[in-house]
Amino acid sequence: MKKVGIVMGSDSDLPIIKKATDMLNSLGIPFEVHVYSAHRTPEQARDFSVNARKNGFGVIIAAAGMAAHLAGAVAANTTLPVIGIPCKGPVLDGMDALLATVQMPTGIPVATVAINGGANAALLAAQILAVEDKELAAKLDAKRASDAKAVLEKDANIMSQL
C-alpha cells in the first residue's frame, strides 16, 4: 500500500494532524509526518515533494494556517494528489488559510477540506488510495456503515425520549 505523506507548516498544527493520523491508523494506512514551512524551509518542502512518488507516497496532506502556502508549494512540485487542511489562526479564524489553500491557479490543484478538517483529509486520502486497493475500499465501506448505524442509534434514542 502507498503511504500518505503529511506535512505541517508548524508544530502548532499537530492537534489537527493528530485527527488525520488517528483516522489513518484506524484504517491501517501507513504515513509519515514532517514539519516543513513553505517560507522558512522551502528547500526541504520542495525536496519532500519532488521525491514523494519515488519514496512510496500515493497522496500528500499539507496543513498550514495564516498565509497557508504549504499545500500549494507542495502541489507545485509533485503530480501526486495534494489535500490541503487550512488551519485556524489567531487573526481571521482560518478564513485566510482557507482562501489561500483553495484559490490555486489552474494547473496546480489542491483538494481542500474544511478549516481544521484533519479527519476528512485522512478520509479523502484513503478514498484516493482505495481507487486501486479493494481491501481499503472495503474498510471505507465498513466505516460508512458503522457511522450510519451510530446516527440511526442516536435517532432512535431521541425518539424514545420524546
Image (spheres, rainbow, N blue to C red):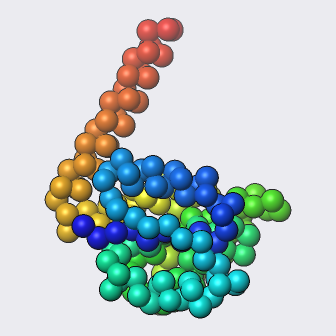
For the N terminus, give its image quadrant: bottom left
Q: Nearer the viewer, residue 24 or 109?
A: 24
Q: Looking at the picture, how far across and down is residue 5, in whole percent?
A: 43, 71
Using residue 34 as the reference point, say whether residue 134 is left or right of it.
left
Q: Looking at the picture, how far across and down is residue 159, in whole percent?
A: 44, 14
Q: Would you identify the image quadrant in which residue 160 lies?
A: top left
The residue positioned farthest toward the top in the image shown: 161
The image shows residue 146, relative to residue 95, as above or below, that is above
The image shows residue 71, relative to residue 50, as above or below, that is above
Q: Looking at the picture, how far across and down is residue 104, in whole percent?
A: 57, 82
Residue 120 at least partly seen: no
Residue, x 44% and y 90% (percent of image)?
Answer: 50
Q: Would you identify the image quadrant in which residue 84 lies?
A: bottom right
Residue, x 34% and y 62% (percent of image)?
Answer: 30
The image shows residue 60, relative to residue 121, as above or below, that is below
Q: Nearer the viewer, residue 126 or 46?
A: 46
Q: Would you identify the image quadrant in which residue 128 lies?
A: bottom left
The image shows residue 74, relative to residue 119, as above or below, that is below
Using residue 124 as the reference point, say whether residue 72 is left or right of it.
right
Residue, x 48% and y 83% (percent of image)?
Answer: 48
Residue 56 at least partly seen: yes
Q: Nearer the viewer, residue 8 or 146?
A: 8
